Image (spheres, helix red, strand yellow):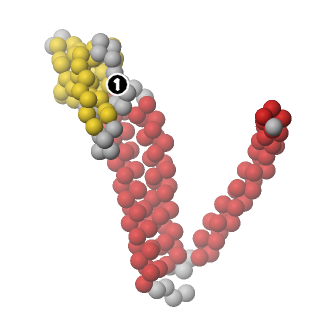
Amino acid sequence: MVHDFWDYTGAAAVVLFGVGQLFIGIAILWRTIERATLWMRGHHARATITSIDEESDSEGHRIYRSTVEFLAATGEPRRIALADTVTGRPRIGARITVVYRPNDPEHVDALGIAKGVGHLIAVPILVVVGVAAIVLPIAYLLGLDGVLAWSEQALADTIDRLDKAISGPLGRLQRLLMDWFG
């Protein structure tokens, strides 16, 4: 098969998109590992939210940065603005757990799992999309259409098997909902 300019241009654009997705995924993974390491190896302390600064994100939505007071492991009182912002307004006087680097008590993070969960969902998606966006156009340009056809057939077969496996329970659920809500 002879490829024209637009085949190469389109493939290059998709590959660049894939590289971008991989870089974003790796950056998020790096930040997640960094945060997990801080949570495991850092010093934990109970802190009190003493003030809240209202800011705007790049889209103009309100975000809030809390300032907290806590006692460092050395017994020294610290008053630090948290590194991350939140979308919900925290309550002044609320007690939270913070974690900070043993050698850098100026870098304080609120202990919580919500940020990590979102990252754990995003990273695999970004990596899979990135790899596919890199591999598939290159395979097409190299004339490996058989590989792409196999991938499409394998996907179709998998979808058919999933449909058969869940159609029984989902079919019963659909009939039940139709009986209830008509």
Q: Is residue 149 above or below residue 34?
A: below
The quarter of the image holding the C terminus is top right
Q: For the point 79% across and 46% down, which residue is it?
A: 167
Which image quadrant for residue 47? Answer: top left
Q: Position of residue 166 (x, y in %)?
A: 76, 45
Give left or right: position of 68 versus 17.
left
Which image quadrant for residue 116? Answer: top left
Q: Position of residue 181 (x, y in %)?
A: 78, 34
Give left or right: position of 69 versus 160.
left
Q: Position of residue 152 (x, y in %)?
A: 64, 66
- Is label 1 in a helix, a strand or a loop? loop
Viewer-closest of 96 and 92: 92
Q: For the point 50% across and 55% down, which residue is it?
A: 128
Q: Position of residue 171 (x, y in %)?
A: 81, 43
What residue sits right under mark 1 in the picture? 89
Which image quadrant for residue 104? Answer: top left
Q: Is residue 125 visible?
A: yes
Query: Residue lying farthest left?
Result: 76
Q: Amino acid at mark 1?
A: Arg
Q: How many marks?
A: 1
Q: For the point 36% across and 31% down, which residue is it?
A: 87
The quarter of the image holding the N terminus is bottom right
Q: Is residue 12 above or below residue 63?
A: below
Q: Is residue 46 visible?
A: no
Query: Residue lying farthest bottom?
Result: 2
- Please tell me how crowded label 1 is: few (under 14), some (14-19), or many (20+) other residues with Cα within 10 Å: some
Give left or right: position of 113 versus 81.
right
Q: For the point 51% across and 73% down, which residue is it?
A: 139
